[in-house]
Amino acid sequence: MRWFITFCVIIFFIGCKSDGKKNVDKIPDEKFIEVIIDLHLGDALLETGKFDPQDKKYHPDNFYAAILKKHNVTREEFDKTLDYFADYPGELMKIYDKVLEELSKKQGKNTGQKKNNPAPVNPVNDSIKKVHLIK
């Protein structure tokens, strides 16, 4: 009987063995990337200061809540996902590499330029050249 109990305890611990990662309900990576992208774009929009600070719609808490709602993510799910990545910063860096890649693509689309093809500088419209032209 003693061997049976020892065997059961060993099987129990082998069955409970994990890969060292938390078993947590986190937002899937692709969805989390989309949320992070929108949060960063929202931050940039709020930083422009072009909104009435008294307008509750543009208060950061309400603004971020609207972004989470857009992606059908609760604050609790988002916080659990952040807690997960706090323990695995290498994985978070991979997520942010994808976020930066997507933001760069969006920036290229918005400016009409490709990443490696910067806009040509027009010397007449360049502000430093204007100063020299005025003198």
Image (cartoon, grey):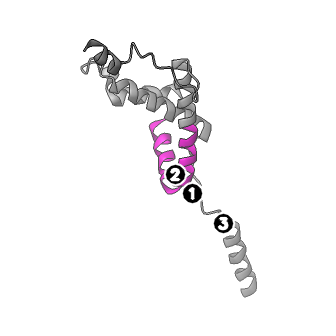
Q: Name the residue rendered at 56%, 42% in the picture.
A: 97
User: Viewer-proximal residue, 9 or 117?
Assistant: 117
Three-letter amino acid code at the position of disc 3: Cys
Task: Check if residue 81 falls in the magenta segment.
Answer: yes
Q: Are marks 1 and 3 in contact (CB under 8 Å)?
A: no
Give the percent coordinates (x, y) of residue 107: 52, 25
Residue numbers of the magenta segment: 74-99
Q: Is mark 1 on a helix, strand or loop?
A: loop
Task: Check if residue 128 falls in the magenta segment.
Answer: no
> Could you say which disc has been placed on residue 84 in the image?
2
Among the two numbered marks 2 and 1 on one chain, the one whose residue lies closer to the N terminus: 1
Q: In this view, does 14 lie above or below 23?
A: below
Three-letter amino acid code at the position of disc 2: Tyr
> Could you say which disc has been placed on residue 128 in the image?
none
Few, some or many C-alpha atoms within 10 Å of disc 2 (few <14, some 14-19, many ≥20)?
many
Q: Are marks 2 and 1 in contact (CB under 8 Å)?
A: yes
Task: Give the residue pinned by disc 1.
Answer: 22
